Amino acid sequence: MKEAIGRAISEAGIIPAVKDADALGRCLSLEQDVVFVLFGDICTIGETIETLHRAGKFAIVHADLIGGLSAKEVAADFLRARGADGVISTRPQVVKRGGELGMFTVLRFFVFDSLSLRSVEKTAAAVGPDMAEILPGIMPRIVRRLSQHLPMPLLCGGLIEEKADVLEALGAGAVAISSTREEVWQL
């Protein structure tokens, strides 16, 4: 399953990231097979995952954004038990646990200075996620550097709002971008 998700992400180039139920409904008819879920709580996330599965899509859930989940490893266990195919988190321990459970894992980083940039390379190598994601994704020079130095594929997200942003990120070495901006989903 992990290989199928990685292949689907790379082939799509653009991953819809949904932040509410309305966006979830609109993404169901898209060609992309992978959806990043950025909303919900412990009472609703199972239904969201089932909705995506019924539409033939992989559900990769951002654990940090699900209300009621802790910042501990058990968040990955909870999401796996609800049927999530993968987990996104800024918390290395959650991503590491997701990998142990056979989930597709994305370790997300906010890059805002040289210290946080160095942390990406060090932490990603130590945790070993299936993919790393940096935000904001509109830094082609940084994307190029990381895509050449990380031992896993790189995703870009955050502030990607138009076609030029997508093309710059992909041209700099990202395998795909994720965006909540629906205008970008079908480029």
Image: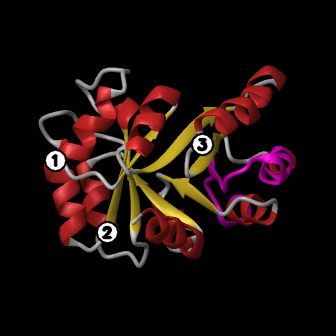
* Kind of residue indicated by mark 2: Lys
Is 117 left, or right, of 47 in this rendering?
right
Q: Which residue is under mark 1?
A: 46
Q: Nearer the viewer, residue 162 or 149?
A: 149
Is 37 left, or right, of 144 in this rendering?
left
Give yes or no for contact between labels 2 and 3 (Cβ–Cβ under 8 Å).
no
Of callouts 3 and 1, which one flags the residue occurring earlier in the amino acid sequence? Answer: 1
SS state under label 2: loop
Quarter of image, res 71: top left
The residue depicted at 39 percent of the width and 60 percent of the height is: 35
The residue depicted at 49 percent of the width and 72 percent of the height is: 8
Percent of width and height locating residue 119: 73, 26
Q: Is residue 62 magenta?
A: no
Q: Is residue 74 above or below residue 35?
A: above
Q: Is residue 148 magenta?
A: yes
Say which of marks 2 and 3 sits in front.
3
Distance Cα–Cα, label 2 vs label 1: 14 Å
Badge number at residue 128:
3
Distance Cα–Cα, label 3 vs label 1: 27 Å
Of callouts 2 and 1, which one flags the residue occurring earlier in the amino acid sequence? Answer: 1
Q: Is residue 5 above or below residue 115?
A: below
Percent of width and height locating residue 30: 38, 75
Which portion, as a residue range, is magenta? Answer: 142-165
SS state under label 1: helix
Mark 1 neighbour class, 10 Å CA radius: few under 14, some 14 to 19, many 20 or more: some
Which corner quadrant holds the C terminus?
A: bottom right
Is 67 left, or right, of 120 in this rendering?
left
Percent of width and height locating residue 63: 36, 35
The residue depicted at 47 percent of the width and 52 percent of the height is: 180
Q: Which residue is under mark 2?
A: 57
Q: Residue furthest front?
A: 100
